[in-house]
Image (cartoon, rainbow, N blue to C red):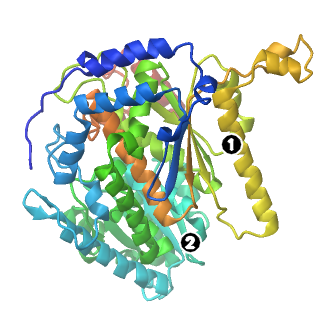
Amino acid sequence: MQSSGSPSAIDPTTTPAWASLVQHAQGLRTTTIRDLLDEPRSALRMQAAGIDFDYARQRVDGKTLELLAQLARETGVESLREAMFAGAHINSTEGRAVLHIALRLPQSATLRADGQDVVADVHAVLQRMADFSEEVRSGMWTGATGETITDIVNIGIGGSDLGPAMAYRALASLVQPGLRCHFVSNVDPADVARALEDLDPARTLVIVASKTFTTAETMTNAQVVRTWLVDRIGEASVPRHFVAVSTNTDAVRAFGIDPANMFGFWDWVGGRYSMDSAIGLSTMIAIGPVNFRALLDGFHAMDEHFRSAPIERNAPALMGLLAVWNRDFLGIPTTAVLPYAQDLARFPAYLQQLTMESNGKSVRRDGTPVDYATGGIYWGEPGTGGQHSFYQLLHQGTDDVACDIIISARPTVAPTPQIAAQHDMLVANALAQAAVLSVGRTVQEVRDSGVPEALAPHKVMPGNRPVSVIMVPDISPFTLGALIAAYEHSVLVQGAVWQINSFDQWGVELGKSVAAGILEDIRTDRTDDAVLDPATRDSLANYLAYRRS
């Protein structure tokens, strides 16, 4: 199944379901989540791939769910889902399939795209990754001086950094003792300098992750690390200390990396969907091939749920539809992702790219402009630290913020009685925040608690903030994969409703090209670049003045 060109798109605001939802939202305006919780909410609680999704604290009722499911069908959510799983070119602006789901299919499966069995290709790369990882982990792979590897430096940016860095932090309890991973993404020289400052080059392996091997930030950092290595242990050391995740054999060879140590991936893998491809090589080395395959199994389990479950009982589909409801019908532009698990500290940052690079679009997939809100803003920090930071605004600010509270039912450190009690405290805080954000505290309840009248207004909590509580049994490779896949599929659902292409990212291109011109201006000490606007020319002149001083 293939498609070409720019597929036609409808205006979702012209569908019967959209009109009904607008009217329904008006009718719910005076109904609070506190009111809604008095009714049975079982339709809003479900399990998928071992994860509990509780949407009971969302500002919806049974009618809302019916209309959202109708909207999904009228905007082609199910047909887009089927097209993705069939290998169609649903990334229409780049003429590509969208097959991150193929990265976690079992070896016995078959999925053909553009006439090629992509599953066979995926497993061939996975096996090469596994073989290499075991060599490094066992000490069989040694550096140029015969030393075993103790430190991995992953150089990438965007999806080539955020996924591996997040997974390394999340699965820290499974990292092989004696191995450390470091992640360099920012072209700020401080980033690479900090990563290298206590490393022994003889024991360091560098992974350069760039599909084209031309990404400016990545290749700049790679050259810095190459110089650092060569200055200390010689030019001949490069092939034993650098490997590549790329498809550009010539550029990899020119850099000094043996193409035998190049791990490829494909155009149908978008960067923000790539952590379970060869981009995850650092993850596999850190946690081992067995655990990496468990990560893939978790992804696949959620894929199968998303593919087969009806919309009304489909956890990722409802996640996406509720995001549309909050964004377009309740006027809530922001979702705070609040993991009550320190190991998921990088998960909100990972989701920022996944959600906002995917759905931050203002034209439909046929190029026509939208006149409705798309692309919610995702951000967050782990609890409980955030409670002493931005939660004040969540509770009593003038804008509503939707919240995803993520809880791990088990701690990731050894459960001594003291640790178990501390974990209970963590979960109690998470559930308390879910309750107060959604239910709040009325002025009468404040007065009844004995608070002086003059102080009572200051202690009212309006509540009525939509909250999803997502509880995983533990932070394991399987549950991490399933959790990520749920958000991936939520993104597809939102994009399908909004009729946008969630799988391109043209918005990042113009800034890159302008930056290249400004860099040339800096190198030539030029301040009169007519291409630039006056404010940018002034800023450039100011920088050059500092640079000369």
Inspect the image, locate mark 2, and give the three-letter code of the amino acid beneath it: Leu
Residue at position x 48%, y 24% from top? Answer: 333
Characterize the local packing of mark 2: few (<14), some (14-19) or many (20 or more) Cα atoms within 10 angstroms: some
In the image, which is nearer the foreground, mark 1 or mark 2?
1
User: Residue 40's spot in the image, x, y percent?
Assistant: 55, 35
In the picture, the quarter occupied by the C terminus is top right
**Along the viewing direction, whichever of 549 and 232 lies nearer the viewer:** 232
The residue under label 2 is 174
Q: In this rendering, is residue 270 above or below 254?
A: above
The residue under label 1 is 431
User: Residue 511's spot in the image, x, y percent?
Assistant: 34, 32
Of the image marks 1 and 2, the number of the one nearer the N terminus: 2
User: Residue 33's spot in the image, x, y percent?
Assistant: 59, 26
Question: Which numbered dot is residue 20?
Answer: none
Give the structural element (helix, strand or loop) at label 2. helix
Q: Can residue 374 be seen in this view?
A: yes
Inspect the image, locate mark 1, and give the three-letter code of the amino acid beneath it: Leu
